[in-house]
Image (tube, coloured by chain):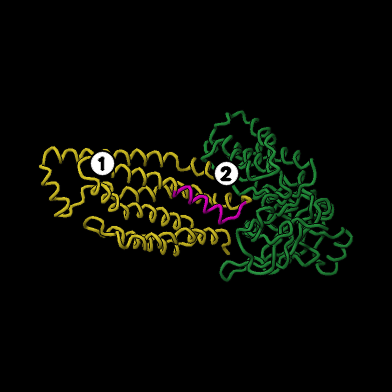
Chain colours: A green, B yellow
Amino acid sequence: MNAAIRVEHLAHRYGRRFIYQDLSFAVPEGKVVALLGKNGVGKTTLIRLLMGFLRPSAGQCRVLGEPSHALSPATRARIGLLFEGHLAYDFMSIAQIERFYRPFYRRWRRELYYDLVDRLGLSHDHKIGNMSCGQRSQVVLGLIFAQDPDLMILDDYSMGLDAGYRRLFLDYLRRFLDEGGKTVFVTSHVVQDMEALVDEVIFLQRGGAVKQLPLVEFRRQFRCFGFRVDGNAPPQADGLIENVDLHGRAPCLYTFAEPAQLAAHLETHWPQVRLGDEQPLTLEDAFIGLTGKY
Amino acid sequence: MMLFAIFLKEWLKVRWVWLGLSVLHLGMLLYLYLVLRHQFRVEHSEMIWYWAFELRRLLYEPIQSLPLISGVLIAAAQFGPEMIGGRFRLSLHLPLRGDLLVWSWVAFGALMGAVLALLDALALYWIVGQWFPHEAAVSAVRTALPWLLGGWIGYFGATLALLEPAASRRLIYLGLSAAFLALLFQHRGYQEYDQVLPMLIAIALLFIPAVILPAHRYRHRS
């Protein structure tokens, strides 16, 4: 497998606090991969490492075959970065920012930028600083498209966008990806958006534990069951049981196991538990089920 | 073309500040002209000669701090917007060597400052030359050279402080720049820096390689 991003035995720490100690995963070329995790697990740090703005404490991150903290200009030209909050040069206008970026990229596709930006109905001398967050997201996405990158790293594209602009962002992104040959590594707090976009998901958990699998596999294998307990000793996560949620109206447990395998496991290890029906799950439910509410 | 794009961005950032500074410089030079003309109208020229060359009173002090103010403001206009919200990261991701990028920026900023410095020097020569002999006009420009160098120090000191991610180093850069500036504003007469100025200029040129350091640290914070 050719990997656009390869992270091997990565460790990073702030002072004495390790964010990860031995993190490894790969983003295959041509795939859309989402990095999901709760606040504070180190998503932003990982994105900064991949973007080359942090140097790993140990291990390595390779992006398009080069160490992420020492990317050559030629490789940087093949990477489209979306910074958190749709960072852009606010003091430039729609036309000025296109004119600024154009000479840096040999494969620049001006028509893609204006195709996207002209839909805003704004004049080309409209200042980016005077745009709404949604409008600015269109400009930034248009610039990334025009760059025609092989790899896109999109850090929390949904930040500050209402539902309409979020949908628009994803519609244009999907249409662009239909051309083929692009790899996308994306983070977002809006988990349900990932359903129609990504091929694989990487769940990053506190301490650097990571679980990577194709989205369809996750949706097919990850299950939620209601249960009740005889007595007051509820089951706990134990390897086969991924998580137990006692905060909701009805308690439920989450597992990758088949129902029969789970039933046998409960009978042996948690005999006081009476397994209920399997519950339908949205992707967001499944994400919370896997990573927990706290 | 890339260089043109970089200069376009820098111009968009500094243009209003630079135009404002140009108006300020022209205004101060006009003020200097009017003050000198007024003095020659109300005083005997022998008296003014006595003030200037016997008492060593500088007749053009009003423009002393202009280059320094200009240097600091140009740096703030250039690098302030890059630092707000971490926009510097956008530039550092451009497919261009980071050191060349930063040097292009400071080359543009220094060029903008140099235009104002040239304006000051030419205007000072012309204004002093209106009432004094050629030698006095040349002397005025040579006396003003440390002030123009102060603009360079102000520009690079502010640039280093703005680009530097670590607060402690920022203070060190500001301290060093302030000390250098203090050296440049010690005189009480004419052309007192003639002997030492080449050495001060040589030291001031070290700011050019130095600006790479904070940019490098910004990129590779760990």
Q: Identify the magenta region.
A: B96-110
Please provide percent x and percent y for residue A131.
Answer: 55, 36
The reply to whether residue A41 is visible in this rendering is no
Residue closer to the observer: A157 or B203: B203
Please provide percent x and percent y for residue A216.
Answer: 83, 50
Q: Chain of mark 2?
A: A
Q: Is residue B108 magenta?
A: yes
Instruction: State the residue lying farthest toward the front.
Output: B134
User: In the figure, residue B43 lies in which quadrant?
Assistant: top left
| Side of A268 relative to A40 (left or right) | right
Alpha-carbon neighbours of circle 1 within 10 Å: few (<14), some, or many (≥20)? many
Residue type, mark 1 in image = Ile
Alpha-carbon neighbours of circle 2 within 10 Å: few (<14), some, or many (≥20)? many
Residue type, mark 2 in image = Ala
In the displayed structure, would residue B72 be above or below residue B210? above
| Residue position marked by numbered label 2 in the rendering | A88
Please provide percent x and percent y for residue A199.
Answer: 79, 50
| Residue position marked by numbered label 1 in the rendering | B127
Quadrant of the rendering where the C terminus of chain A is positioned = bottom right
- As helix, strand or loop, the secondary structure at mark 2 comes to loop
Q: Is residue A249 magenta?
A: no
